[in-house]
């Protein structure tokens, strides 16, 4: 569709809608309010049926379906209440009708200005199911690790002559040669992987790190695999290949709180059209990380925009304290801390509790904690009114302490006090 055709069509439709509204306002005939509300309620009932169909088709998950059911049901009840209140009312007063007329006449320029700024003339509508399908196709069609590395090799600029670099490269070459006769030298391969990465030889660094994991065998931990994933991604120029994704999955199976794996998993979703999932992963990573984490600047710069894309109301919290400050300030909020916060102003209380929440969340993510710590975290999130994060913590606590009902009891009590259990 041409720009002229688009604007002609959009203008004609808008003028027609405005004309109908003007006529309706000028005629000011009383409408059957019961009929109008009945139509509105039918729309909401249809929406509830559509939610069930989407859930059955797998378009949305159970959690999203529950949230949508709650929202639509609330609107249905509001419409029913409005119908009851509106019975017996007649047409609006003349002054209100004239105010409505002025408002309608102001809609056209405002609509055109808004669409000029954020619209996309010439592009068809893109339903959610289609966007998810396209994202899945994009993810499946990613180049593999070898193809990405080949592409990077073509783009890599020639290394500049540098005496220090040349000396470093010569030492690394000697180490590489020596390790050919010492295939089980764990420390040597660790040193080789680190120095290959320092030289920018990420493919060689990944090979050396793979050997480290092989030598360690069952003793290889999540951090060992996270280092390998990072080298693979750097070798691919920052793209997360299927091979790197498989390594990230291994990391998160071993350690669901691994910061490196969470960062690159969020990056993977961003690269494959699922910025909504990037927001969910990076929000969690932000909340559990110290303020001096290497990814913190990027997360804080990206989260507000990602929230808009995901359709989530989100206010970026204060930057968490640095790791050293977290250690100095203690494990997290006590009941006395939370009660003391209630005497502060709203802004001071939010800042205080957010800082304590960040410290406790970081400690639970890195070191674990007793059930009482989980309970304090849920209570603090309840003070902040952050039910979404509180529910996530409660669900995770059920996994951690599910086999120990006595240990789970204080966490359950905190969840009940926070209004999570009904």
Image (spheres, grey):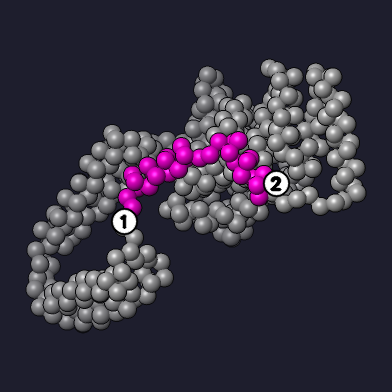
Percent x, y of residue 194:
79, 36
Label located before the other in sequence (1 or 2): 1
Q: Nearer the viewer, residue 78 or 199?
A: 199
Mark 1 or 2, closer to the camera? 1
The secondary element bearing badge 2 is classed as loop
The residue that appears at 74% across and 34% down in the rendered structure is 205
Quadrant of the drawing holding the N terminus: bottom left
- The x, y position of residue 287, in whole percent, is 60, 45
**Left or right: 135 in relation to 215:** left
The segment highlighted magenta reads: 126-155
Can residue 156 be seen from the camera position used here?
yes
Give percent across and percent down for residue 59.
33, 39
- Quadrant including the C terminus: top left
Asked whether 141 or 240 is in front, the reply is: 141
Q: Is residue 144 magenta?
A: yes
Q: Residue at x 18, y 74 (%)?
A: 16
Query: Which of the 4 quarters of the picture holds residue 259?
Result: top right
Q: Is residue 222 left or right of residue 196?
A: left
Residue 312 vertical placement versus 333 (above, below) = below
Give the residue drawn at x 42%, y 40%.
136
Q: Mark 2 = which residue? A: 293
Magenta stretch containing residue 88, yes or no? no
63 in relation to 385, above or below:
above
Q: Where does label 1 land, which residue?
A: 125
- Say few, some or many: other residues with alpha carbon within 10 Å of mark 1 (under 14 / 14 to 19 / 20 or more): few
Identity of the residue drawn at 10% across and 58% down: 35
Question: In front: 215, or 118?
Answer: 215
- Whole-percent x, y for residue 30 in the image: 9, 70
Locate residue 56 relative to residue 283 in the image: left or right.
Answer: left
- Residue 93 can be seen in this image: no
Q: Secondary structure at mark 1?
A: loop
In this rendered view, identify the residue nearer to me: 123 or 295: 123
């Amino acid at each position: 569709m041409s720009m002229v055709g688009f604007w002609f069509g959009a203008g004609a439709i808008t003028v027609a809608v405005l004309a109908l509204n003007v006529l309706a306002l000028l005629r000011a005939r009383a409408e059957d309010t019961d009929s109008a509300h009945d139509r509105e309620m039918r729309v909401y009932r249809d929406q509830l049926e559509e939610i069930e169909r989407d859930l059955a088709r797998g378009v949305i998950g159970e959690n999203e379906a529950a949230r949508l059911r709650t929202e639509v049901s609330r609107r249905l009840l509001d419409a029913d209440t409005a119908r009851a209140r509106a019975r017996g009312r007649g047409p609006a007063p003349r002054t209100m009708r004239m105010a409505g007329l002025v408002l309608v006449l102001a809609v056209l320029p405002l609509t055109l200005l808004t669409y000029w700024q954020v619209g996309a003339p010439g592009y068809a509508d893109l339903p959610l199911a289609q966007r998810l399908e396209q994202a899945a196709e994009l993810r499946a069609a990613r180049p593999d690790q070898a193809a990405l590395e080949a592409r990077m090799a073509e783009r890599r600029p020639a290394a500049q002559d540098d005496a220090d670099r040349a000396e470093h490269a010569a030492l690394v070459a000697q180490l590489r040669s020596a390790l050919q006769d010492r295939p089980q030298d764990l420390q040597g391969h660790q040193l080789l992987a680190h120095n290959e990465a320092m030289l920018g030889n990420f493919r060689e660094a990944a090979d050396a790190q793979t050997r480290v994991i092989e030598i360690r065998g069952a003793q290889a931990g999540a951090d060992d695999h996270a280092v390998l994933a990072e080298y693979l991604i750097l070798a691919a120029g920052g793209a997360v290949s299927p091979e790197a994704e498989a390594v990230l999955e291994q990391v998160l199976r071993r350690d669901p709180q691994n910061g490196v794996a969470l960062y690159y998993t969020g990056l993977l979703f961003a690269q494959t059209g699922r910025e909504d999932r990037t927001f969910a992963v990076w929000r969690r990573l932000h909340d559990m990380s110290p303020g001096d984490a290497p990814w913190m600047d990027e997360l804080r710069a990206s989260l507000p925009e990602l929230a808009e894309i995901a359709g989530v109301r989100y206010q970026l919290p204060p930057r968490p304290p640095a790791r050293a400050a977290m250690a100095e300030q203690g494990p997290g909020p006590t009941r006395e801390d939370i009660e003391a916060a209630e005497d502060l102003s709203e802004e001071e209380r939010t800042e205080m509790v957010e800082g304590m929440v960040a410290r406790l969340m970081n400690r639970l993510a890195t070191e674990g904690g007793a059930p009482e710590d989980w309970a304090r975290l849920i209570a603090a999130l309840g003070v902040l009114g952050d039910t979404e994060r509180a529910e996530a913590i409660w669900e995770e606590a059920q996994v951690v302490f599910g086999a120990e009902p006595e240990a789970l009891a204080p966490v359950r009590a905190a969840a009940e006090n926070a209004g999570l259990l009904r």
